[in-house]
Every structure is written in structure tokens, then in C-alpha cells.
Amino acid sequence: MKQAQLGDFSQAQTELVEMAAVPMDEVGQLHRTYRLMIQKINELITENYAKQIVIKETQFKALQAQINPHFLYNTLESINWLAKANGQKQISSMVEALGFLLRSSISLKETLITVQEELDIVTNYLIIQKYRFEDRLLFELDMPEEAKSAYLPKLTLQPLLENAIHYGLETMLEPCRIRITGEVEGDRLRITVEDNGQGMSAELLEQVRAGAAPTRGSGIGLKNIEERIIIAFGEAYGIRIESEPERGTQVSVMIPYTR
């Protein structure tokens, strides 16, 4: 009890477990009940701590981009003005898309946004990537109108699209087809991002599902996305990954159909 009073629940739980067998009298029952209480408190503290780490990690990645944001926005506006003045429509379009992405990723006011707002982020991200990959990037969007007002954690679909380009398109010489589709299933909404890239072996797929696969880059990973969905909506929701070698990868986001 003194260990618990000091806030060291893990040590208190260890000492309770290490004690000899407890008799079945009143003191023994008190001991067992207290042990279960300490164990539950320690589990709740650990679970809450893990959730806070996930939230802070996502916020930190966004905060990294906040190096004098007004200077960045003003610089982009100047570039955009020069591009328009010189008739460079492509440069102007890319700069406007980049400015939208910066504002969206830096803003921490809302952790949940509508599917339509997330698709706006995806659209501006695609504008930039289309100029880079041109005809090699084939994108399709099939989202029912009723699904666009549902809510999901911010920056859920854009990182999945980025992964599809990074691990699918960039490893191919021929065009890569990437699709985002949505389907309302009762009280759930399934949003799927799929590509026809090189896919993954069964071994690598298991590593990815377990969050143990080696990654490239420093973006928001699948594990982070899933944990933010679970924090927002509960254990019944998250992401599902399917992939086969030479047959592409499919990542499905399962969220409640709440509008």
C-alpha cells in the first residue's frame, strides 16, 4: 500500500505477486481484491500513457512544420504571384496545392474532420504528385455522397495514398492505378485505398500488420493511423491490410458511419 501511495503501481503489483500463498480468511480476500485493483489501475495507466504517446507523436510531426508558418505562406504567395504573372499555370497550381497541404497539416484545431475535408487534402496532394509522375499515376475516386459527411481522424487517407505511391508507383516502370473507394455497411463505413503495385509477401504482410516491418521515410505509419482510429472510435474499428506479390495492396479503413 505504501508503494501505491508513492505512485509506483508496477512495484506494488510485483510485491503482491511475489508474496507467499495467502490464506482464505478475510485478510486473504482483502489481499486478493487489492492485488486485482492494483493490476487494473496499472493497466489503465499504461493504456492511457500509450494513447497519449500516439496523440503527441501525431501532433509533433505536424508541429515540426510550424517553423515560422507565416513566412512560408507569404513566400508561397509571392511564388504564386510570380508564376501567374509569367503565365506559369502549372507552377501556380502546385504552389496553391502545397499551401493548402501546409495549412491542413499544421492546423491542430480539429482532430476529427469529414471525409470530404480529408478528400480535399488528398486532391491537393495529388495535384503535386500528378505533375511529378504525369501519366504513370492513374487515380480513381469512388466515394458515395452520403459517406462524405462522415467523420474520421485527420490525415487518415492522405498517408495511405502516400504509401501507395511510395511503395507501389515508385517501384514500377509501367503506370500504377490507385483507387479510393467508400462503402456504407450498416452502421459502418469502409474506405479502401488500393493499388496494383508489386504487393507484399506473406511474411512481410504479417510484419506490416504487427507494426514490425522496416519503413522508409518519416511519414505517419499504418500503426499510428490505426491507433488514432481506435482512440477516436474504439477497438471495434481500425485498418485491415491485404496484399499479394505482383497483385497490389489494399488497405481498408473501418470507421463508424456517424455524420
Image: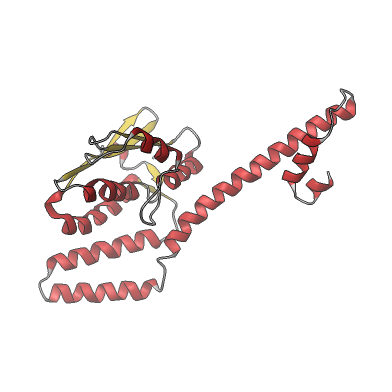
Residue 216 shows in this picture? yes
In the rendered image, residue 233, in percent from the top left (x then y), is placed at: 48, 39
Q: Nearer the viewer, residue 102 or 201?
A: 201
Location of residue 59 with respect to 201 vertically, above or below: below
Location of residue 253 with respect to 22 vertically, above or below: below
User: Where the C terminus falls, by quadrant?
Assistant: top left
Q: Nearer the viewer, residue 37 or 219?
A: 219
Q: Residue at x 21, y 64 (%)?
A: 94
In the rendered image, residue 180, in percent from the top left (x then y), is placed at: 26, 41
In the rendered image, residue 173, in percent from the top left (x then y), is placed at: 15, 48
Q: Residue at x 32, y 72 (%)?
A: 73
**In the image, 36: left or right of 128?**
right
Residue 140 shows in this picture? no
Quadrant of the rendered image containing residue 130: bottom left
Q: Nearer the viewer, residue 196 or 225?
A: 196
Counting labels gives: 0
Q: How is the image coloured?
A: secondary structure
Location of residue 94 with respect to 148 vertically, above or below: below
In the rendered image, residue 44, in percent from the top left (x then y), is placed at: 64, 41
Q: Which residue is most to the top?
A: 24
Location of residue 101 with respect to 27 vertically, above or below: below
Quadrant of the rendered image containing residue 27: top right
User: Where the N terminus falls, by quadrant?
Assistant: top right
Q: Residue at x 86, y 22 (%)?
A: 24
Q: Residue at x 80, y 30 (%)?
A: 32
